[in-house]
Image (cartoon, rainbow, N blue to C red):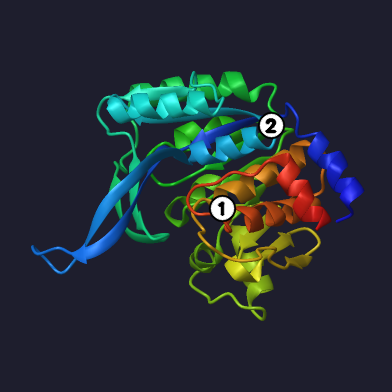
Amino acid sequence: MELKRARRIVSAFRGARICVLGDVMLDLFVRGTVSRISPEAPVPVVEIVSEDFCLGGAGNVAHNIASLGGDPFLVSVTGSDHNGERLRAVMGQCGLRTDGILSDPRRPTVVKSRIIAHNQQMIRVDRECQSPVAAGVVRRLVAILEENIRGSRAVLVSDYAKGTVTRATIAPARRAGGIPVLVDPKVASANLYKGATIVTPNLKEAERMGLGEIVDDASLKRVARRIMSRLQCPHLLITRGEDGMTLCDRASGEVTHIPAQAREVYDVTGAGDTVIATLALARAAGATWLEGATLANHAAGIVVGRLGTATVTSEELLASVGA
């Protein structure tokens, strides 16, 4: 991509409203040092140096949109607990609105805690609930979505299978009409995404959506066609880690491979969030799907070079394109 064209697209990110539906969560990073083994069990003792809370899941998607200059409106659910209050506080610190975040007293706020020592993740502990949100909360979510999709330039669904994305809550996105609907999927919920404009599975998800066939260079086109037919979606972007991304077009049958941009892979946490956030903004800014995927590939190359949940700025993105 020419830098001049990239600048034109990225400049149009500014203020672009993207409606985000999905599972919001807190990422807790506990960092420390290890100098001894516990006398109680053969495990290392981590002496804590710092603790940091970041937005995870759909929250990280929204944060990436905001960091790139867009205007995200996040619609999600937390528990009625201390972590829910903390999550809203973190959203405020990131400059994100919280009026689309509802509370469900029957469930905990999703928290993923990672213990890191000497720049290596040692263990992750999850607190979560995967059952659908309460019916009354669903009705309020739908009302919020229907109101805020109006005026949005794209709808982004970030499904982490924690109960927010259901047939009822995704319905307003499917009825949106005239604006792209982008989905970061979970395989078990694939049938919910029928009619989306583009779906962005990773390689393992694509293999499972493609009925278990291993995805390689020889089978990729066939598997992609099968997935797009199953989901009735015109576009598919398969993220392939160190092998980059592959963009597929159902109408033309064209398959375009985009090599990875990462200089050094340090941590893949949240990279998929960055990809779909950048892709949604690019499309809202008038980019083609290939241009959007190319920018998303650059953005992913930046965040995987950082430890923990990370975001990208428009300046960093343009610097990567021009490098």
Residue 322, above or below 77:
below
Residue denoted by label 2: 70
Q: Looking at the rendering, in which quadrant would you find the C terminus?
A: bottom right
In whole angstroms, how far apart are the C-alphas of marks 2 and 1? 18 Å
- Asked which secondary structure carries label 1, the reply is helix
Looking at numbered disc 2 in the image, what kind of residue is underneath it? Gly
Q: Give the side of residue 77 with respect to residue 269, left or right.
A: left
Residue 28, above or below 133:
below
Looking at numbered disc 1 in the image, what kind of residue is underneath it? Gly
Q: Looking at the rendering, in which quadrant would you find the N terminus?
A: bottom right
Q: Can residue 150 be seen in this view?
A: yes
| Residue contact at pointers 2 and 1, CB within 8 angstroms | no
What residue sits 29% from the left and 24% below the top?
Answer: 80
What residue sits 73% from the left and 41% below the top?
Answer: 314
Residue 164, above or below 292:
above
- Asked which secondary structure carries label 2, the reply is loop
* Farthest residue, direction front: 35
Q: Earlier in the sequence, mark 2 or mark 1?
A: 2
Q: Where is residue 115 in the image (x, y as percent from the top left)?
A: 32, 53
Q: Position of residue 293 (x, y in %)?
A: 73, 54
What residue sits 42% from the left and 54% below the top?
Answer: 188
Q: Where is residue 186 in the image (x, y as percent from the top left)?
A: 47, 53
Q: Quadrant of residue 19?
A: top right
What residue sits 36% from the left and 30% below the top?
Answer: 78
Residue denoted by label 1: 272
Q: In the rendered picture of this protein, how many numbered marks are placed on residues?
A: 2
Residue 217, above or below 294:
below
Q: Give the side of residue 281 with respect to residue 191, left or right.
A: right
